[in-house]
Image (cartoon, grey):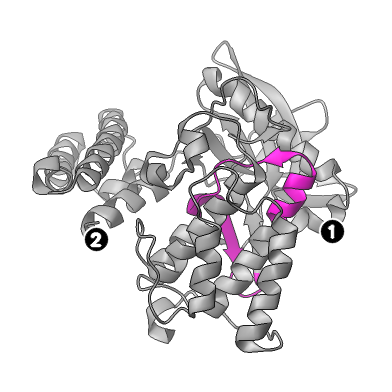
Amino acid sequence: MNEKLTRLSERLAAACLPEDVFGALDGPPGEQAAGLKKRYREMARLTHPDAYFTPLERTFAEQTFIQLAGWLEKAEKRVKAGQYGRAPGSSAGLTLCSRKREYTIQPGYTEAGLYNCYPCQFELDGQVQQAVLKVVRQPENNDLAQNEAQVLQCLQAGPGAARFSPYFPALYDAFAYRQAGADHQALVVDRPDGWVTLEAVHHAYPRGIDPKDMAWIWRRLLTALGHAHRCGVIHAAVLPGSISIHPALHGLRLENWLAARTNPQESGEWVTLLDLRYQDWYPVEITRRQAPLPGTDIGMSARCMVYLLSGEAHSTRLPTRVPRPLRQFLAGCLLPGRLARPQDAWALKQEFDELLTRLWGKRTFHPFSMTGELNH
């Protein structure tokens, strides 16, 4: 896969505002519009399908072009309104009330997926808590946000939930917010500091991370999946943007539960949200709209580890610096058959721990830094 095209796609996916894509634009709106068109044309040339030779690259280029066009439309609207380059946190200082409590909105508005996200704070048991208020941008997506809230509630109420709570977003509240004559589903979740997605890790380590770093990340991810599966929840979208780690503390959080379901049934059509940047990562049961199994999540988690180890976004090959037993172990989790992959995340973690002991002996803390290739 073309490296420049891949980096552009990842940049578009990580953007919260058009400014994150096209950068600063100087001058009055007329000059900004001209500068915007120039930068857009430069990026659009990189996404032209005729510049690529394989069907996979052409398809990837077309998808990236569609994403780029969407950001251009948003940028043009902000330029026309005289808002380009200005922080959109005009709601800062306002309060929003649910049946549970009152939330004070703070500066720092962003857009993330289907949500508008607002840093906020509220009082709980006499203490001020920092959180994020996530409001669905389009009311037609209310059902997805409601589903995410229900799934998080299920994870928080499951067996041994207190022990596993660090692996998931903490849901403080969920309610309907009336805006412009329509109800928008809102969620309030915790706001931890110091976390980065696996996409950011990939940027820091374009040639791949140390296998020992992959080991602690996957062990924690399998723990999170084990709890979710015991609660009857299948994530169905275990992708790099849904997994965050805390490099210093070796923490892990599995996020983005919009597409998840509790106790999926074998019958009927399974509908999920496909991230086009990773469409070839999804197991066959997802693309065929069949009900996923625990092995669906396990297979996608292994694919994320290959991504971290190889440094190649769409490769299934691992470099020779990765020990052969580890390469074989991951390959066993990536089998195409729906029932061929392991189905028990905790049992798999136990097997993985035994493999790590054979490879490297007793486990010790392996410091990890986001300075990337400088220390690699």
The image shows residue 298 at horizontal and vertical percentages of 60, 53
Q: What residue type is labelled 2?
A: Glu
Q: Count residues near mark 2 (Cα–Cα under 10 Å), then give few for <14, some for 14-19, many for 20+.
A: few
Residue denoted by label 2: 3
The image shows residue 318 at horizontal and vertical percentages of 40, 70
Q: Give the range drawn in magenta.
A: 224-250
Q: Distance between the residues labelled 2 and 1?
A: 40 Å
Q: Which amino acid does label 1 sit on?
A: Arg
Quadrant assignment, res 151: top right
Q: In which quarter of the image is the C terminus?
A: bottom left
Q: Answer whether residue 236 is magenta in the image.
A: yes
Q: Residue at 60% of width from left, 35% of height from top?
A: 258
> In terms of sequence position, does the residue under pointer 2 or pointer 1 come before the other?
2
Which residue, as the protein is rendered here, is positioned at the far top? 181
Q: Taking 194 as reference, is 101 left or right? A: right
Q: Count residues near mark 1 (Cα–Cα under 10 Å), then give few for <14, some for 14-19, many for 20+.
A: few
Q: Taking 269 as reference, is 124 left or right? A: right
5 vs 371: above or below: above
The image shows residue 367 at horizontal and vertical percentages of 59, 83
Indicate which disc residue 163 carries. Answer: 1
Q: Taking 260 as reference, is 369 left or right? A: left
The image shows residue 217 at horizontal and vertical percentages of 60, 67
Q: In this rendered view, identify the residue nearer to me: 190 or 254.
A: 254
Q: Answer whether residue 97 is magenta in the image.
A: no
Q: Residue at 31% of width from left, 39% of height from top?
A: 84
Of helix, strand and loop, which one carries label 2? helix
